[in-house]
Image (tube, rainbow, N blue to C red):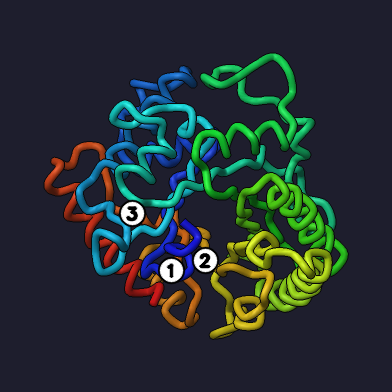
Amino acid sequence: MRDQLLHGHGFLAALDQSGGSTPSALQNYQYPSDLYQGNEASMFEAVHGMRCRIMQSPVFLSPQESAGGVLGAILFEDTLHRTVEGQQTAQYLWNTKQIIPFLKIDQGLLPKVAGVQLMKPFEESPPAPSAPYSSSSLVSLEEKLQTARNMGVFGTKMRSVIHENNPKGIKVVVEQQFDYGKRILKAGLVPILEPEVNIESAEKQECEETLKKCLLQALDQLQEESSGGDENISQVILKLSIPCQDNFYQECMDHPACLKVVALSGGYSQAEANSRLSKQPKMIASFSRALSEGLTHNLSDEEFNKVLEASIASIVQASV
């Protein structure tokens, strides 16, 4: 899986809309709201059906099956515990599609403080009561990671958000991401660290400059702490907003402790996200909304696959 991530030609598909963003995802998919409104279980069934339609599409291919394609897919935890064609989702992705499975593990965001939103602490966030994997007890990060690894997951993803250029706030965001990232590495998984910069921020470029300094310091520290060991064990993936300056994160990409830098679409349209990403050499896409743009419930399978195929081709091209 690591070799495909390093050398494959393609991008990461983000299929990890959380419970909070699922209604808007279904709205964009034009799924009839009266079929799930007020019923969380029905809502998760509906969005799993949407994700299955994407994953099972004959055009949703890994680079092993095409000239360029989907290197990996990021899953919501509910999706991980469901099945596709009789297989657990992560196993289906790798065994049937040769697509690397990642798991979104964060439990959402805290309110904004010092211009940023940190992640909710893992041990303080129980699983959703209606989820098929729920229990009455709190789930620690290590328990969550062990379950993911046992189910064939390669890596994880966790998101925090930067709204303002507050150096202290941004430093805390990066520290939290890397502190959890080290625990994920210790569990034998590869963490995707996502300190997103809000694309609507009036200080977006300044935020990115501060963020890059903090990231490079954290990468240096990670490298120092793991010196003498297997370098692969101490590598993280960074998922970042597409920066204002071209080739801005090159130093991060070249750092020994960084396996890959991927881009979130952050609310840009597919065309805008692709245009911006194409100016960032070596940065590949990890799109959600931009990937599913134009996919609707009422499309025939032929129409659905045609739209998805065009989207994948354009995102692969932007990820060159």
Residue 182 is left or right of residue 240, and the answer is right
- Contact between marks 1 and 3 (CB within 8 A): the answer is no
The answer to whether residue 197 is visible is no
Q: Which residue is mark 1?
A: 273
Q: Residues within 10 Å of mark 1 (few under 14, many from 20)?
A: many
Task: Report the amino acid beneath label 3.
Answer: Glu
Farthest-out residue, top: 136
Indicate the quadrant containing the C terminus: top left, top right, bottom left or bottom right: bottom left
- Per the model, the C-alpha gap separating discs 2 and 3 is 17 Å
Between discs 2 and 3, the one toward the N terminus: 2
Q: Say what secondary structure mark 1 lies in.
A: helix
Q: Which residue is mark 2?
A: 263
Task: Report the amino acid beneath label 2.
Answer: Ala
- Contact between marks 2 and 1 (CB within 8 A): the answer is yes
- Residue 47, image x and y in percent? 39, 33
Q: Which residue is mark 3?
A: 293
Q: Residues within 10 Å of mark 3 (few under 14, many from 20)?
A: some
Query: 267 and 305: which one is in front?
Result: 305
- Residue 46, image x and y in percent? 36, 28
Foreground mark, 2 or 3, reads 2
